[in-house]
Image: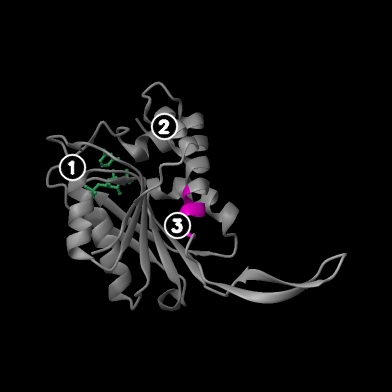
Amino acid sequence: MGKLTICDHPLIQHKLTFIRDKDTKTKDFRELVDEVATMMAYEITRDLPLETVTVSTPVIEATSKVVSGRMLGLIPILRAGLGMVEGMLKLIPSAKVGHIGLFRNPETLEPVEYYVNLPSDAPERLLIVIDPMLATGGSANAAIQALKTRGCTQIKLMCLIAAPEGVKAVQEAHPDVDIFLASLDSHLNDHGYIVPGLGDAGDRMFGTK
Ligand code: PRP
Ligand code: URA
């Protein structure tokens, strides 16, 4: 079973409150999501392997650590996942970025795939699927499956807010995928929205409603 990590740093939890607030305007919503994505990138890269190198300080030649060439890929699920990419790239600027376009059919809640564009060396990279919302888990599962179908094997999932239903769905379908969240919320409502959640992430991010 994939590991579930809640990134409970006080600054993440503080900013998440304002992301949830319905009165937060699009500009501030975007900035806050960007900031939280940077902080979560710190957490999700915690287990990157290190190697020892030699460095000449102004004082002496010393041994020190660098990340040992682990190649990363960020895979935002369109649309709302886009809002977390820049924040993560601030910490991991050499990551490549692939895109998976999915939307949820509002009646069936089933994901509909409309776009997949991955780095050519995606199968050699550790891929982080990014989406603010993990509700039924249909979109995340479809995105992870799209990566696996193309030969990718090292995959993590990073979301701001999840419902227990979505976590369970991903853990059952993809037990090899670790999940990182800022919050595990209460439940899904009858329309498949996370409660308390933040509403429609894409609309709030891009001001489309
Ligand atoms: C939202 C969200 C996730 C999905 C989560 O996207 O960004 O991708 O719903 O729901 P699920 O876990 O039940 O699949 P949406 O379908 O609204 O598309 P959009 O980002 O283009 O608005
Ligand atoms: N998608 C969203 O944007 N919000 C939810 O609460 C559920 C799915």
Magenta-drawn segment = 40-45
Q: Quadrant of residue 147?
A: bottom left
Which mark is in front, 1 or 2?
Answer: 2
Q: Dot 1 corresponds to which residue? A: 106
Question: Which disc, if any, is residue 44?
Answer: 3
- Residue at horizontal 41%, vertical 32%? 19
Q: Dot 2 corresponds to which residue? A: 19
Question: In the picture provided, is 50 more to the left or to the right than 108?
Answer: right
Tell me if residue 136 can be seen.
no
Distance from Cα at disc 1 to Cα at disc 2: 23 Å
Is the CB–ligand 1 distance for label 3 below 8 Å? Answer: no
Q: Amino acid at mark 1?
A: Pro
Q: Quadrant of the C terminus?
A: top left
Above/below status of 7 relative to 140: above
Residue density around tag 3, few if under 14, some if 14–19, many if 20 or more, within 10 Å: some
Above/below status of 26 relative to 202: above
Above/below status of 207 relative to 131: above
The spot of residue 71 in percent (x, y) is 52, 72
